[in-house]
Each structure stands twice: as C-alpha cells, then as structure tokens.
Image: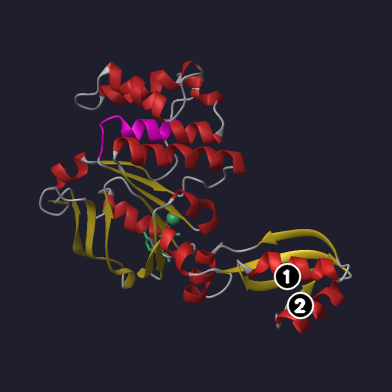
Amino acid sequence: MTKTAMELIDVKKTIGNKDIIRGLSFEIRKGEVFGFIGPNGAGKTTTIRMMVGLMGLSGGDVRILGNSINSDYKSAIREVGAIVENPEMYPFMTGKQNLMHYARMMPRVTKERIQEVIELVGLEKPIKEKAGKYSLGMRQRLGIAQALLHKPSVLILDEPTNGLDPAGIREIRRYIRKLAEEENVAVIISSHLLSEIEQMCDRIGLIKNGEMIAIQDVNAATAETTDVGIEMEAAPVNQAAEILHNEHGINATVVNDRLSLHVERETIPKIVQTLVNYDIQIYQVVTTKSTLEDKFFDLIGENTIG
Ligand SMILES: Nc1ncnc2c1ncn2[C@@H]1O[C@H](COP(=O)(O)OP(=O)(O)O)[C@@H](O)[C@H]1O
Ligand SMILES: [Mg+2]
C-alpha cells in the first residue's frame, strides 16, 4: 500500500502575465504533518487553493490518493478537508448545531462521526454553547472538526495559527499531532512563522517566489547539526566576553548587556563552568534560534521568515 496521500506534480499558476507558482513538486504522506512555510506573498494560499479545487491549475497536476484533480476531480476532492479562509460559522447556533448543519450537506456522516470529531478536537464541553461565544482557538477547532466530518485522507490548513496566542498554538499543536497519529490523516499546515509550527511538523517545505527552496525532515535537521545559538545574561558582560575568547576561542557579541554566541551544544556546560570559575555572575542562558531556523535563514535570507 502506498504511503503517499497527496502529490503535486510540476504545479504552475499564472495570473495575467505573472508566474505566481513556478512548478511545484512534492508529496505528503499518510500520517505526517507537513509544514508549508514561506514569507507573505510566497504563494502558499495560491497553492492551497489549487490543492482544494478552489482555483484551476495553469499547469501540472495534483493527485490525491492517486486521483487526478484535473481528470477525476470528484474522487480527488472527496479525500480533502480544508480550512482556507476563516471557517464559516453561524454564531447563533451552538457548535454542535453548526456541525449538524454541515453534516446534512454531506453524504454518509453519522451521529457517531459527529461525536468522534468533537472529541478529536477536544470540544466536548463548549460544543453545547453558541459558536458566537467561542474564542478564536475554539473557532479554529470547530472549523477543523467540520473539515474532518467526511473522514478525508488529507487535511489542509492555511495559516491556522494566525492571531492565536501561545496557549492557542500549543493546543492546536497537540490535536494536530493526534489527528495525524490516530486518524492517519496527512496534514498540510501553512505558516509564515516557522517557530509557530516547527514543533508539530514531521517535514517542512520552504516556499519562496512560487518555488520550493528546500524540504527538510525536522528530526534529521535537529540531529545533523549540534550548533546552537545562545544568549547569556552575565555580569560584568565585557569581561565575560573576553574570558570566552581567551579560554575557548569563542567570539561572542555583546548586545544590551547580553552575550550572543554560537556553540556546539556540548560546549554550553563547559563555558558556563569557565565563567563561574572567573566569578562571573550568570543570570540566564537561553537558546535563541533552532537549527532549522538557522538553516532556513541561510537559504532564504535573514528576517524574511520568523
Ligand atoms: N488573484 C490574484 N491576482 C493576481 N495576483 C495574485 C492573486 N492572488 C495572489 N496573487 C499574488 O500571488 C502571490 C502569492 O500570493 P499568496 O498565494 O496569497 O501568498 P501567501 O499565501 O504565501 O502569502 C502574491 O504576490 C500575490 O500578490
Ligand atoms: Mg496566504
């Protein structure tokens, strides 16, 4: 049995005389969470609109469980659940009534399935309340529940963390992982902020100017480099920088009474030990950037993502 849930083959989109998507090819596997990352205007939403059949392709093909969106649209689209723009809800109906309303428009959605998706996104309690009272995070979860009603093989979410606070993002992270693992759904999640979605993804694809720049296995990226960026609050800070240079050959920069440096992870306890031996006061040591962020910054140019 194939593991591929969705495949893009040289997908192109031209609007007017502008090449917005310039030949994208990649696949998403069953049970994986694929992060679709890129700066604003990179072409994420345009690609997603083509994946879900909201927009025609100028070239190439999208195959969902092997079904071509060009030649077998109905079979292809049956396997897709998505939230592209803000999920549509009726504020005066309860969460449950909203789901029942959508279920009536789809074939073969049972009462049991409705209950199942409510539990999947953890909305058991608020489901009896009016959707108008929901927080943004709860609305997102209700939207996802709705997109899952017909048991799609692929779930596509366009910037679902937009506007969510850190607690909301943590919550999304938890049930997205659960979905991939328990329902074997292939999840595609787009964002312009790598830091917000990195932790929930198995692989990340980086898009810029309508082209895929890199596809990276998240765990492999963390395993293959041990170099980390750290910031240290230490006093006196200039003396600390000098010691690090003399004792370890490390060139730290001093910014606002803090040291900023790159070291191998194993070196961190050693430099802390050295500084303590010299009676430097250490108030804080924090890692600043993930290795994946560093890698992507190199590929795309500083400050365009994250
Ligand atoms: N209907 C359209 N007509 C012309 N240009 C468009 C249209 N939709 C999107 N674009 C352009 O395509 C590019 C990609 O947009 P979009 O897919 O929304 O990017 P992202 O979702 O990554 O921020 C942008 O330069 C945008 O201005
Ligand atoms: Mg977008």
Q: Is residue 124 above or below residue 145?
A: above
The location of residue 177, given as percent across then percent down, is: 41, 42
Residue 263 found in image quarter: bottom right
Q: Nearer the viewer, residue 37 or 85?
A: 37
Q: Nearer the viewer, residue 7 or 74?
A: 7
Write the residue at 29% across / 18% down.
Answer: 112
Residue 203 found in image quarter: bottom left
Between the C-alphas of marks 2 and 1, the distance is 7 Å
Q: Name the residue that disc number 1 marks.
A: 271
Q: Main secondary structure of the magenta part?
A: helix
Q: Amino acid at mark 2?
A: Leu
Q: Is residue 200 above or below residue 289?
A: above
Indicate yes or no whether the magenta region holds residue 262: no
Q: Name the residue that disc number 2 marks.
A: 244
Q: Amino acid at mark 1?
A: Ile
Q: Are marks 2 and 1 in contact (CB under 8 Å)?
A: yes
Q: Is residue 64 visible?
A: yes
Indicate yes or no whether the magenta region holds residue 150: yes
Residue 277 relative to residue 90: left or right: right
- Please give the range of residues in magenta: 142-152
